[in-house]
Amino acid sequence: MIEIKGITKSYKTGDIISPVLKNVSFKIEDGEFVAIMGPSGSGKSTLMHILGCLDMPTSGQYFLDGHDISKLSDDELADIRMKKIGFVFQSFNLLPRATVLRNVSLPLMYAGVKKEERQRLAAQALAASAFPEKFWNHYSNQLSGGMTQRVAIARALVNNPSLVLADEPTGNLDTKTGEIVLDTFQRLHAEQGHTIILITHEQYVAEHAERIIHIKDGEIVNDNKNHNRRIINHYKIT
Amino acid sequence: MIISDLFQEIYTALSANKARTSLTILGIVIGIGSVIAMVSIGQGAAGQIQSSIEGLGSNLLTVIPGVVQPGRGIVSSGRGSAQTLKNEDTDILKQIAGVAYVSPEFQRRFQITSTGGNNTNSTIIGVTADYPQVRNVSVEQGAFIAENQLRGISRVAVLGPTVAKDLFADADPIGKTIRINKTNFKVIGVLQTKGSGGFFNPDDTVFVPLTTMQKILAGDDFLSTIAVSVISKELMPQVQEEATFALAEKHRVDPQSPDFSIVSQADILGTLTQVTDTFTIFLAAVAGISLIVGGIGIMNMMLTTVTERTREIGLRKAIGAKRRDINLQFLAEAVALTFVGGIVGVLLGWIISIAVSSFAGIATSVSISSVLLAFGVSAFIGIVFGYYPARQASRLNPIEALRYE
């Protein structure tokens, strides 16, 4: 469960303090599929960095699974990211000279998991993100965009996180491959009950989630259940 | 992160740009290789000098006229110019406990001609029968100068092998006559080859009885050197001290500032070792500079790598890598570069030193300690020059690193 209470974040450039997030509070239950939507400059990336434990709020509290993590050191935050959070980035961020399996098992390497166990968990995560087995030993720079993003999703899932954070996951993809990725998220949510937060500026992408939080100029303007949810569900597991 | 993961990461990273990696390693190879080669040449030269000094005779004290000035060494002493050593000094030295043999010597250069008409300019040394025992020489053909030839002021000569060859080529010189300074001498023996001792080549010498030298050839009765052989190495300092006092008393001079000097083999060896050590340090320093340049190459490459892989570092941090993990990875890459460079460099240095000893004739010796030192230094350089880039990498802010284009 995620709970943030009165989060503010401001950046200081010289003497000018520019607030990016102003008193943001919300609660996300386990197993929810939430989209955080807003135009660029709205503060949604900053919010994602705080939710992903990459950044600290200026004030306010952040509880992840009941632990207050708004005042931890760099290494303690790294530990939380390793155990509880999975990231999917717009630009994929895979290691180009490593195989698919190695990319997926990378978080487990830092967690100190044994090699055989890593292989098993990576295979499980790749299967869950519907990544075809014949490409498992390919180098990640030999794959298409949609395939690459599914490797990234598998990598986000491999440590069985409490929270999967996807930052514009379809931003670099065409509509069709974007839908494959969104379908993958929907299926993971429906079948495995992962908590997923999708950050996007596109209404169309946000409509794939159960709940949409609108954010504008650092404040929540709207936080509602999505009544016109788009369900894809016609891309079968291969 | 376990060791095998670290190796895999290093391999992946370093094999990504093979040309750059090889060139960076080459810098270390040249550095380590030249250190190994230079030190081996220096140590080889030192060993060669040591063995040739020891070959001149064992447990040897040399009394020479004049004063060896401190700091200027034996080379610059006024050898032969002062005329303070006399024949009587020999008898005094013989009475000191611990002295085995005493060899008074008088040397001077003269023109020598053979009956066949060949001539050479060589050092003539007037010696006694004890010379072979003291100076560690032996006769190849014929006999050395005997006691009765000394008493009889005989005109006989023993030739060094080089002189024998110069005067008689391949003919047997025994019984032949040579002319030294217009006086005829009969050749009674030829010495075995000994090899050059550095400053003085005992092979290029002619020996005559001391009495003959003083009375007929030179017309002076002083000595240029008295060589004293001591029974054992342990007695040498004691004998040296007693000899100094005895001779000072005889010459009526203050033992603190005598008109002669007693030089032991250890002194000569010490002076020469000092020279070769300086030489070795100098060579190693020059080679060390190239090693530092190689290290800078490593640092340069690592800094470039960190910049190039900023996003990768950001990603690693986002998925849970701690500072320590990133630090370790980049430091290990730098150490791997220097370590590979160290191995290849030791082999290269070894090959160079073998080549130098076979082509240039300088003895070389690659010691285990210099190999271990080279490995230690290369690992140290990896750590020193890899530390800063690794620290830069580990301190990157993950958010900014992920945004880096």
Image (spheres, coloured by chain):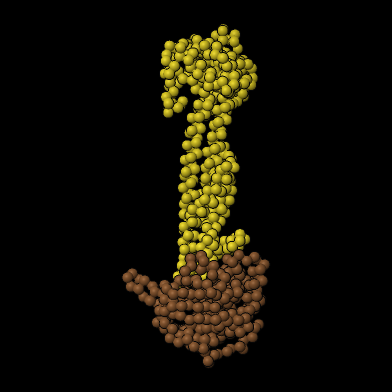
Chain colours: A brown, B yellow
Query: In which quarter of the view is residue A235 placed?
Result: bottom right
Residue at the image point whose x is 55% and y is 45% from the top: B373
Q: Is residue A148 visible?
A: no
Front-most of residues B185 and B85:
B85
Q: Is residue B403 left or right of residue B206?
A: left
Quadrant containing the C terminus of chain A in the rendered view = bottom right
B316 shown above or below A207: above
Q: Is residue B282 visible?
A: yes
Front-most of residues A109 and B174:
A109
Residue B366 location, x and y as percent? 58, 41
Residue A85 location, x and y as percent? 55, 74
Residue A44 location, x and y as percent? 45, 79
Residue at the image point whose x is 59% and y is 70% from the top: A103
Quadrant containing the N terminus of chain A in the rendered view = bottom right
A212 shown above or below B287: below
- Point out the residue furthest to the bottom here: A228
User: Disc count in the image?
Assistant: 0
